Amino acid sequence: MTHLINFLSKQDIQTLEESFAKTEWQDGKATASGSAKERKKNWQISEADLKVDPVFRRLKQFMMDHDGFKFMAFPHKIINIRAAKYGLGDGYGWHVDSPTMGGYRSDISFTIFLREKDAYEGGELEFDFGTHKMRVKGERGQMVFYPTGVLHRVSPVTKGERVVIVGWIQSLISVAEDRDQLALLFSETYRLRHKFCPDPTDQDFDALNRAVQHMIRRFSA
């Protein structure tokens, strides 16, 4: 399942872009392997670049602390975060991301959109789930994340420039279906508690909350 959430503010994005302006973009093929090298055409700035390392480290900490993300992705480790830029004619053909990166398991892939939707044409993130296909073109500051292993591509940019941040996550919950069900259970418990027990000292939902916490521990890798 894919999730699209509001994530970064305009100020957050401005800080990132100011950092990117201090360094140079590198050919994206350098981080592709196998047949993906021939399908990938973009420019990147990796977290290994010392000029952007501080801003990427702050971004990763923000991700780990973000409630809307934390209780859907259950992040343990954020891996290989990078900025990616797609100009006219650039894109990334159909591919599947690597299941491991840098010695860590990659469970979730994510993209954070840094441009307005109407700032470029093409450049949609497309998914093939076997039974159906879908495409995402997020608003500026939104994040989309999805199980690593889903066949996907970035369609060629036909006008303007697409700029995003991408990366991968090793989740505490390794199985995507388990993550989705735990996220649903957590969000529904939170919704019902605030609907029927707005008093934070009310104990009526304590037993259910303990059960939710137990299931998170039970499914943690």
Image: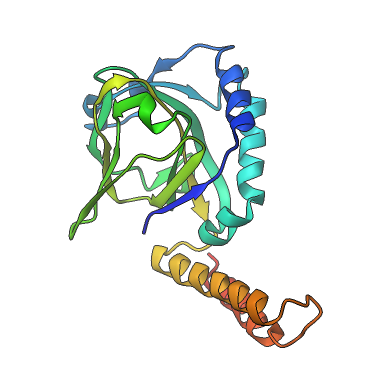
Q: Quadrant of residue 91?
A: top left
Residue 129 vs residue 26: left or right? left
Name the residue: 23% across, 55% down: 129
Please tell me whether residue 139 is drawn above or below residue 46 in the rendered image. Answer: below
Q: Position of residue 119 (x, y in %)?
A: 38, 24
Q: Quadrant of residue 14?
A: top right
Q: Residue furthest right?
A: 201
Residue 213 vs residue 105: left or right? right
Please tell me whether residue 54 is drawn above or below residue 189 in the rendered image. Answer: above
Name the residue: 67% across, 81% down: 210
Q: Quadrant of the N terminus?
A: bottom left
Q: Residue furthest left?
A: 131
Q: Nearer the viewer, residue 184 or 118?
A: 118
In this rendering, the count of numbered labels is 0
Name the residue: 18% across, 57% down: 130
Q: Nearer the viewer, residue 219 or 134?
A: 134
Residue 162 vs residue 83: left or right? left
Q: Position of residue 147 (x, y in %)?
A: 38, 54
Q: Position of residue 148 (x, y in %)?
A: 37, 50
Name the residue: 60% across, 18% down: 18
Q: Nearer the viewer, residue 12 or 30?
A: 12
Q: Position of residue 125 (x, y in %)?
A: 31, 39
Question: How was the colour assigned to the protein in this rendering?
Answer: rainbow
